[in-house]
Amino acid sequence: MLHVIFSVDYEIHGNGDGDPKALMVEPTARMLRLLEEYGAKLTIMADVAEILRFKEYAERTGRDDYGYQAIVEQLLQAIASGHDVQLHIHSSYFNAVHQQDCWAQDWSEYDFAMLPYERMDWMVKTCKEYLESLLKPVKQDYACMAFRAANWSVSPSTNVVRALLNNRIEIDTSVWKFGRRNGAVKFDYSSAPSALLPWRASEADICVPDRNGRLWEIPIYTEKRWLGAFLARGRLYRVMCDVFHKGPFHLSQAKAGQGEPSGPGGPRRRSRLAALKALFDTHAWKADFNQCDGRQLVKALQRAERLVPQGRDLQLPFVLIGHSKLFTPSNEGTLRPFLAHIARHSDRFAFGTLQGMGSFHRQWAAL
Ligand SMILES: [Zn+2]
């Protein structure tokens, strides 16, 4: 049986602008209402690094301009209603400074996988302790046990795997097979063993299975697709948001402390064109519920079923990704056929969460 996991990255725009109430709280409330109609569960991947900045801002100024209380209430309510909250980290927010209506981030800490082990370990520990102290009072057995890096940056892997394990994080869900980036973050996940089936990750390379590994990689479901598969309306919206609200455009500029490039026809414009081209050159098609419509997702789920080893009663995750900031009202309509399909075929599919997957590790060891 496939357990369909709706994971949503809960954050403002990558460049530090945007209102958390509009980009996180409001769309997530719509998402929760929609999923609950079908008995589905949401796994909120909360960027605790930025949430901690919003908290500190409210405490320092006495003004809750960034909706910290609304965020806390939403996370508590989600857990109380049987949804899940797990960890997402945009590391550049830890040293972020509030400037006018924006958060100026520390771009030297943008690429999570490149941080020194001690810094990474401290970040994971700080965020895990925050989530557990917040959420255990409403759910005794709540555990922060799953992680997704900002921009899927978990390569090189040695420090990441060690830091996650040191903080009793059992699951990483950053890898998507066929995924490649060669910009502000760099990775190549084309060698990942599966687009669907979890594996025990090697410390040396998260894409290499290791029977003795203690961290489970649960990949975001991906397919290699032709260009036409990218042309759902939601995906176009995502492309435009990525291009116009992305964080550092060139790591070299970020490292030099130059912030973002600007000016008409200048490097920013060229970067936008390059970003558009790069997005359309990439043929990795993620199961992204902002960008794919319900009909596409139903077909992807049917293809994923064929990857399940036959003859064994295995409980396996099918991880979708989404972003609260991109969840438009039209997403609600396009997602309904997918939700209805899963609910109608309860003999083959279930609605799951990442923490809920924790009990199935033993089964997966035999994969
Ligand atoms: Zn993110």
Image (cartoon, rainbow, N blue to C red):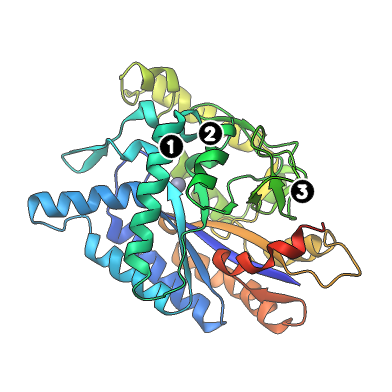
Tell me which corner region of the image, top left, top right, bottom left or bottom right, holds residue 266: top left
Name the image quarter holding the C terminus. bottom right
First in sequence, mark 2 or 3: give its number.
2
- Return the residue nearer the eye: 89 or 341: 89
Name the image quarter holding the N terminus. bottom right
Going 29% across and 70% down the picture, which residue do you hit? 73
Badge 2 density bin: few <14, some 14–19, many ≥20, Cα 10 Å:
many
Q: Mark 3 = which residue?
A: 194
Residue 50 appears at what percent x and percent y? 31, 48
Residue 326 appears at what percent x and percent y? 45, 55
Q: Is residue 11 visible?
A: no
Q: Mark 1 = which residue?
A: 120
Q: Amino acid at mark 3?
A: Ser
Going 68% across and 54% down the picture, which residue do you hit? 221
Q: Mark 2 = which residue?
A: 159
Q: Are marks 1 and 2 in contact (CB under 8 Å)?
A: yes
Q: Amino acid at mark 1?
A: Met
- Return the residue nearer the eye: 169 or 67: 169
